[in-house]
Image (tube, grey):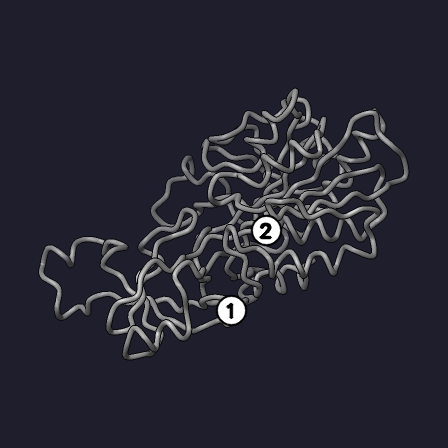
Amino acid sequence: MLDTLKTLCYLSGVSGNEDEVRDYILERIMPYSDRIVTDSMGNLIAEKKGKKSCAKKILICAHMDEVGLIITGIDDDGFLRFDFIGGVDRRVVLGKRIYIGKDRVHGVIGIKPHHLVDKEEEKSVPKREDMYIDIGVASKDEAKELVSLGDTAVFEDNVLEFGEGFLKAKALDDRIGCAAMIKLIESDLPCDCTFAFTVQEEVGTRGAQIAAFRTSPDIAIVLEGTTASDIPGVPDGKRICSLGGGIVIPFMDKGTLYSRRLYKMTAELAEKNGIKWQTKNVIAGGTDARVIQRSGTGTETVALSAPVRNIHSPASIAKISDFEVMPRLATLLLEAISEE
């Protein structure tokens, strides 16, 4: 799973432009799937037979897209103007390297240099409108040969294992869930399952809404990355969850009240099988579950999440021991559901 995750994090997949990620996943899962469909939104939906058929239809879901940038303008001197796709904190992008479009044009996000700002500007984070992208050209015509309005951009894609079992990369939210789903599809499942690799989660869980309507699940298991704030200056009661604390099983976030029955069942399975787990101690974030839960006649939902520091940034950090158990716990849950 770790090698798969690293490969996924090197790929570009800004919301609305997930093709590169989807093509890789499709190649990986095609030999193991019984039926695969790419819908009009770009969701990749795969069906796989398990050891038995359940009375209830089960959907397992993770989103392929990541936060990024979109090019909105080109200045006469060749600098690019941009906006964000998804929730990106302006503070994390200053001076960062990016790649633009399919040709991976190199760029650097710039601002007015320090010696030109006044005292008031020193005290504030620059507005997005005051930032620009430098792609190393001298004119608008030169820039237009390399990029076009509407091109999307991703942060530099260095992947690094460091410290005692930590991983740094972009797009850990939610390539972790995608890697776990690939591993599940490549394994022998206890029951029939439908898998949805969804698009446009970061801009409003749009792909999942269509996928849920298309598949009409009774039960959904959402595999995600979630915000960890176990950092200096944040008191214990506000840390949401912590790296090294194990897989996160939330009972609620800002979009979903998860099934109490499935929450309890999953937590008990983790305890029984020696899988370290935690829950969120702050109601924060949201997942594809928010629209899946409300689709059709309603879907019973549960989430398995990996805690991620610096989420939605070029340097997201996760602990390998927290997320590598995700496929195992999902399999245990599938076994329990299939035996009901």
Q: How far across and down, in percent of the image, does residue 260 sit?
A: 63, 22
Q: CB of mark 2 within 8 Å of CB of mark 1?
A: no
Quarter holding the C terminus is top right
Amino acid type indicated by mark 1: Asn
Image quarter of residue 5: bottom right
Q: Which residue is drawn at 75% across and 45% down?
A: 46
Residue 37's disc is none
Work out which residue is located at the far left of the displayed protein and give it: 119
Q: Which residue is drawn at 79% across and 55% down?
A: 30
* Relative to 53, 313 lies left or right: left
Q: Indicate which label's residue lies in the foreground, 2 or 1.
A: 2
Separation of residues labelled 2 and 1 (CA atoms):
18 Å
* Relative to 32, 112 lies left or right: left
Q: Is residue 219 above or below residue 33?
A: above
Q: Is residue 279 above or below residue 174?
A: above
Could you tell which of marks 2 and 1 lies nearer the N-terminus?
2
Badge 1 marks a residue whose secondary structure is loop
**Residue 246 appears in the picture as rendered:** no
Circle 1 Cα neighbour tier, 10 Å, few/some/many (<14 / 14–19 / ≥20)? few
**Residue 292 appears in the picture as rendered:** yes
Q: How far across and down, in percent of the image, does residue 249 sit?
A: 60, 35
Given residues 10 and 213, the one toward you in this image is: 213
Q: How far across and down, in percent of the image, does residue 79 sit?
A: 29, 70
Circle 2 residue: 64
Badge 2 marks a residue whose secondary structure is loop
Quarter holding the N terminus is bottom right
Q: Residue at x 51, y 53 (%)?
A: 66
Amino acid type indicated by mark 2: Met
Q: How far across and down, in percent of the image, does residue 327 sit?
A: 72, 47
Residue 158's disc is 1
Q: In this view, does 215 lie above or below 176?
A: above
